Amino acid sequence: GRYLTCCNSGRRSEAAAYLLERMGHDVAVLWPGMESAGNSDRAWLSSESHIEHWLRADGTLTAVERWYAEALRVNDRPVDAIPTLRRALQDQRALDVADTPRVRSVLVQLALALDSAGQQDEGLRLMREAVALEAVHNPKDSDDRLSFVGRLAAVLMAAGHVDEAMALNQRLATIEQQLGSAGELLVLNRRVLEARGLAMQGEFGAASRAAATAAERAGDRFAQQRAEAWTAAALSARLRRHPGLALTHAQQALADPRAATFPLAVLASANAEAARL
């Protein structure tokens, strides 16, 4: 397909066009007053001196690359996102000199992409680095702390470091209490992780209760987290050797009306539980 960008959004539009062209897409640029994209002059897209030099020098292209890679990752294309995120991290560090919050942001995205792509060792190392930077940048606990530590706990759980993940999960609960309030999605993610961790630690009764509570709290508003909670309940029931109950919970996750919109990893986890029975 052809991508169309308009210069009304300034350098970000030009950077998007340049990035798409460099990745092999057919790009047309519509300038003000033109009646059709066919009248645009695409020669500037191949001019390194006119485009990449100043777009990369002021960080515009790096930002667009980061947004593009993040879109790839959240749309279940982490392998495609990794090369762009590596370059964005390299460029951001060159631009900022020090490890700024912008560097931290790219680190998180790259860590998540690597984890989703099965490169868990590097993903975990970069996520630890991002969490350490967040603590330097934000000395006081906040929703940012909950988000970063929560992501590290999730990566640890996926990598099989259950005890460390659960210790961080308890830390998250303490921070929530200290703050007095926290984003609902952050709370739900923590509770789903808690249910999964309890199951893997053999605390089946507590895991089932935690999963049921999380699923009820999530409701229709957070359908993905509800499905993840039912999947955790299925894990607990399977490990407890209650196959019928495990299958019921896995089917609850997969039968969600919004299941088609869930990330592939969420569906794969629920399908895996159903397939083991």
Image (spheres, grey):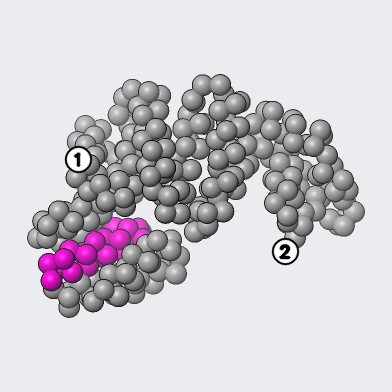
- Along the viewing direction, whichever of 34 and 93 lies nearer the viewer: 93
Q: Is residue 182 above or below residue 40?
A: above
Q: Residue beneath label 2, please?
A: 1
Residue at coordinates 71% horizontally, 34% vertically from top-left? 55
x and y percent of residue 116 in the render?
43, 53
Quadrant where the C terminus is found in the figure: bottom left
Q: Earlier in the sequence, mark 2 or mark 1?
A: 2
Name the residue type under label 2: Gly
Q: Is residue 261 above or below residue 21?
A: below
Q: Residue beneath label 1, please?
A: 167
> Magenta stretch?
217-241
Residue at coordinates 38% horizontally, 44% vertically from top-left? 121
Q: Is residue 142 left or right of residue 243?
A: right
Q: Secondary structure at mark 2?
A: loop
Name the residue type under label 1: Ala
- To which quarter of the image does residue 37 belong? bottom right
- Along the viewing direction, whichever of 275 and 212 lies nearer the viewer: 275
Residue at coordinates 74% horizontally, 42% vertically from top-left? 14
Q: Is residue 238 left or right of residue 94?
A: left
- Along the viewing direction, whichever of 257 and 72 lies nearer the viewer: 72
Is residue 71 shown to the viewer in this render? no
x and y percent of residue 250 in the render?
27, 71
Q: Is residue 104 above or below residue 155?
A: above
- To which quarter of the image does residue 141 belong? top left
Q: Residues within 10 Å of mark 1 (few under 14, many from 20)?
A: few
Specify whether residue 238 is painted magenta. yes
**Prevalent SS, magenta region:** helix
Specify whether residue 34 is painted magenta. no
Quadrant where the N terminus is found in the figure: bottom right
